[in-house]
Image: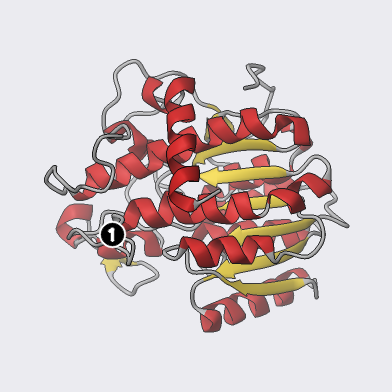
Amino acid sequence: MSTASPRIPFGAHSTAAEVVHGVDLTGKRALVTGGASGIGLETALALAGAGAEVTLAVRDPESGARAADRVRQETGSPNVHVAVVDLADPAGARAVGESWNGPLHILVNNAGIMALPELSRTEQGWERQYAVNVLGHAALTLGLHDALRAAGGARVVTVSSSAHLMAPVDFDDIHFTHRPYEAWTAYGQSKSAAILFTVALARRWAADGVTANALHPGGIMTNLQRHLSDEQLRFVGATDEAGRKLQVPPGWKTPQQGAATSVLLAASPLVDGVTGRYFEDCRPAAPQPDPAPGRSGIAAWAADESAADRLWDDITKQLGF
């Protein structure tokens, strides 16, 4: 893991366009999961605007096609494609990765689901948030190993969350087989696991020239909040992407600001060689000695290399790598 702290002139209010201004990604190829809406779409717009060939990895092909048309229209780039990926199906996600043709320079693991109100399982019996947020992205990433290695200096960027401060990974009962299900514990665990996977990946793929970093994008009103009630969000007024009347509270970001840290890690020369780190507001996060909801920084349980090794072994065994 790189311990250097780069000097970065961006912060919480920076936008993806500002972060990528002056960066030339001509000849680079990028894949963005969840690229049909929210910060995934804004990430795709920024990367395509800088000259990258961008593929939107989406579950719904119609939404993906609409998003791809928007990216083409707003950036003028014809090199925008759609790949259908259901992250709840790790075998399918792996197949998409392994079928990729040629090098891949940028992988942004952006898609996710949050705070499902009831326990939901995949066909394999896995808790759905962990399956989508962790196992699906892991299967896609591991399936893309050869393409990332072939790029020479590829970057893997994984969107985690400050919600990781709510819960470590419970290795004894990841899928809530014995303990009572709690929506935020499940979500927090999945985001802790996303960081640990990044730590493990950074160490194992360094020799291939691949860097891997995770991030908290900030609070952004997107489709991610679709499972939350107005009472849970505690505000009413404006309209979100799902059509509900909501008021974005002070301190929350626009989608363009929320995508800034993803784009920084995906494209900026300011973070060349930086790997195995967790960023927030475009900067490396400080250790958080007292993890709790609403706080910033990174919990020790999400940076622990022995836990990362255990998670890696668990994931690769589950996925058959």
Residue 5, horizontal then vertical, whole percent: 64, 19
Amino acid carrying label 1: it is: Gly
Check disc 1 and report the residue beneath it: 125
Q: Which of 32 and 147 is in front in this view?
A: 147
Q: Which of 141 and 158 is in front in this view?
A: 141
The extreme right residue here reads 27
Q: Nearer the viewer, residue 294 or 302?
A: 302
Please give left or right for residue 24 compared with residue 33 in the image.
right
| Residue at x 49% of width, y 72% of height | 59
Please give left or right for residue 39 compared with residue 241 in the image.
right
| Residue at x 35% of width, y 36% of height | 164
Viewer can see residue 172:
yes
Question: Looking at the image, is 55 positioned above or below residue 276?
Answer: below
| Residue at x 36% of width, y 50% of height | 130
Question: Looking at the image, is 200 positioned above or below residue 229?
Answer: above
Question: Looking at the image, is 51 positioned above or below residue 167?
Answer: below
Query: How many marks do you count on the picture?
Result: 1
Q: Which of 248 and 213 is in front in this view?
A: 213
Residue 156, horizontal then vertical, whole percent: 64, 44
Residue 116, horizontal then vertical, whole percent: 25, 59
Question: Looking at the image, is 45 positioned above or below residue 19?
Answer: below
Residue 172, horizontal then vertical, whole percent: 25, 35
**Toward which corner of the image does residue 225 lie, by quadrant?**
bottom left
Say what secondary structure mark 1 lies in: loop
Image quadrant in which the N terminus is located = top right
| Residue at x 69% of width, y 22% of height | 7
Please give left or right for residue 211 compared with residue 141 in the image.
right
